[in-house]
Image (spheres, rainbow, N blue to C red):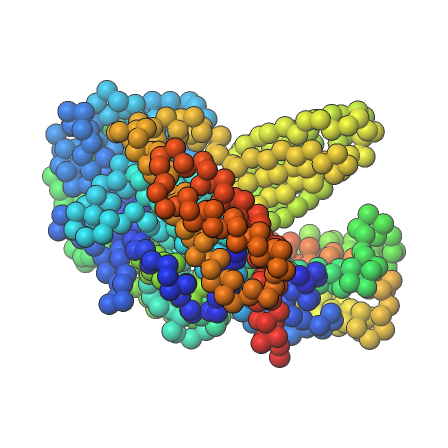
Amino acid sequence: MPVNAFETLGMSPEYDINLDTLSNHYLERQRLVHPDRFISKPSEEKLYAQQHSSYLNQCYQTLKDNISRAEALLDYHKTPFDSAENTIQDPVLLHESMDHREKLMMMDTKEQLYNFKQDIENIIKAVVLEMKNNLDALKDFHKAKKLILRLKYLEKLLTEIKQKEAADS
Amino acid sequence: MSLLQIHEPGKTPQPHEEKSVAIGIDLGTTNSVVGFADEKGVRILSIDGHNLVPSAVGIKDKNFVIGKDALKLRDSNPQDVITSIKRLISSSAKEIPYFNHKIENKEQDAMALVKLEDQILNPVHLSSEILKYLKNKVNDKVENQINQCVITVPAYFPESARVATKDAAKLAGLDVLRLISEPTAAALAYNLDEAKEGYYLVYDLGGGTFDITLLKMSKGVFQVIATGGNTSIGGDDIDFEIAHNFSQNLKDLSQSGQKKLLQISKEAKEFLSQNPDRLWKNGKYKLSYNDLEKLSEKIVSTTIKGVKNTLIDAKITEISDINEIILVGGSTRLPSIKNALKDYFSKEPLCSINPDEVVALGAALQARALTHGSDKLLLDVTPLSLGLETMGGMIEKVIPRNSAIPCSIAQEFTTYQDGQNALSIHVLQGEREMVDQCQSLGKFILKGIPPMSAGMARILVTFTLDADGLLSVTAREKTTGIQQSIHIKPSYGLSHEQMATMLKESYEHAEEDVKQRLLTEACVDAQQILNVLTTALENDRDLLSEAEFDQIRTTSNELAALLEHPALEDRNKVVGVTKNLESLTQEFAERRINKAVNKALKGSEI
């Protein structure tokens, strides 16, 4: 059996993947193994279908997400990202996060929030580009780990902005 | 069985398998509806001349009366009739703020109990009476007895309510092929896969529940992207607001007085929904459409807020990305709901199929797809997060809401005290951070952890959700391999013993019948594995060595011989040999899967 998410979903082990292709591959495979296809089969067979289908869901989730895909790729290159040893110690990142948090607290108009959201989304796009470069071209895994940390923090911030937007509207 | 068969999309199962027939049931809060699909199309099966069967259960002279008859009985004996049973199934007795019938155990964190005549009944039993009635009525009309079905549940139904619904079906003698969510069923009924690919939002406001489901259609696959809503608001709340407007001291009225006033309020709502330009009058009560709009405003705006939150969950920022909005549930007939949605989406919502029937039609289509094969596939998600209690009454989420199901997720936990030899696993469902704000699903204890210093033990907890959204949890200590697991039964649901007793009571001629059924089931399973094995050997004998082949052949001959004239007491033997054959062929099955998957992968490379 294929062992990693990339192989399972028929994707080459790269950070820069086409999400439409990924989705198509996922749906094709899910059509083969989903438990609904085995409804009139004996229970053990249904269980197999369930396990296959669950595994596909897990792999798809991993590859779809910008952060977990990076982590999966580091696993693939046998230099796993360990969240325990990668805490925010980088003073630049620390400063950035405190600055953003302060901004978010001060915001009170819809427009401000919207603009701030756009800014953060643009930063995320830039970090993802940088990640592609480091993982696919430069193979600088140390740098990639730092970028994962930054992405994690930015995604969390984005969720908080959206929650604030929803609460206000 | 391990001979996993892989077939190409759209191809129906093996030709030698007899196709079973299944119905789709919308077990609603107010009405229940049965749908059926065959090669000619999909339709509602009318029962006693009506498409909707009131979800009402009454007792008269110790006999159950269901549906219309129960409502008739309510006029004379309101204390012996119960409606809106589904509200009782989705929360525990003390969580139900207001109900149309006295709850016997109001203070308990247990499944609500009600009294009809002199019988104390739980909602699983009551629901099973409705299902049994539907099943019998349908079977009166058909030649081959139908005992398989797809039942719809609100997307937002918690784990416990799903288990309870399945239990009710089991009690009614129905085999549930799949629980599917009501909004998804509605989308199936609208045949959206033939429409353009993209996002669709289903807004479902029933009598007692509110569901939002966001679906994505692509390549014949319906993917549920996100769900939201609230199990405790619905059209009934609008009736309640109206009744409260008519009489400020509603709660002081007698049970039957309350029921009557709520009934009048409902009539007012329905009249004004159809005739917004007229004034509704009944004795000393009157209501205008403007009044109705004001009284329902709070509920309507709560639902619109729910829609917004669901879109955020799904990371949809542009509301123009939504192709269509589909209305489901009788309560969406209220014009102010249509208007509110139209204002928000700048689009006219879809409501061409009768909102009371659309869910049953979709369930019937899914029942047909499951029994006869289909080129479409439905991928669903879990509506609520599932997690574990950690130190300090906090919750660690293991499966976040809107995860695609089936799924299996493992997380590692550890001990917090030196020499700790047991770990209590408390499983919860909900979105809040603290244990007492979420619903407890069950507890178990992993014992026999070897003495280690705190934080050294590695305990792997695995949450597995099946395609119906039902959960099982396993905990395993990695160094010793000791393991404990449970299938989640709601803590206020029925215990296995209670369920067993009820099942036993429901068999009138218990023992003999049961034995016969067990034997038949065992033989059917055995025959099936033999059939599959024959096909598998025809196609893939080359995957086996001579020795392996001989061993499989001997065991399968033994099983075939047993099946020729099986007696009641042979059941265990049949099961035993079947199991043997299964384990013998497991390796073979894995090789076949690999072969099939490799083939499929080769075929789909781009």
Q: Position of residue B173 (x, y in %)?
A: 31, 40
Can you say which quadrant of the picture contains the N terminus of chain A?
A: bottom right
Compared across the picture, whether B453 is left or right of B11 comes to right
Report if residue B160 is visible in the image.
no
Residue under the point 49% across and 51% down:
B556
Residue under the point 34% across and 22% down:
B104
Q: In the picture shown, does residue B507 fall above or below B270?
A: above
Q: Position of residue B574 (x, y in %)?
A: 44, 41
Q: Position of residue B5 (x, y in %)?
A: 50, 61
Q: In the picture shown, does residue B241 fall above or below B216?
A: above
Labels in figure, total: 0
Viewer-proximal residue among B348 and B57:
B57
Viewer-proximal residue among B557 and B215:
B557
Compared across the picture, whether A102 is left or right of B123 comes to right
Q: Position of residue B64 (x, y in %)?
A: 20, 31
Residue under the point 26% across and 29% down:
B509
Residue that lies at the very extreme toward the bottom in this rendered image = B606
Residue under the point 62% across and 79% down:
B606
Quadrant hosting residue B357 = bottom left
Report if residue B274 is visible in the image.
yes
Viewer-proximal residue among B25 and B143:
B143
Viewer-proximal residue among B482 and B388:
B482
Compared across the picture, whether B188 is left or right of A23 comes to left
Q: In the picture shown, does residue B266 fall above or below A98?
A: above
Quadrant hosting residue B414 = top right
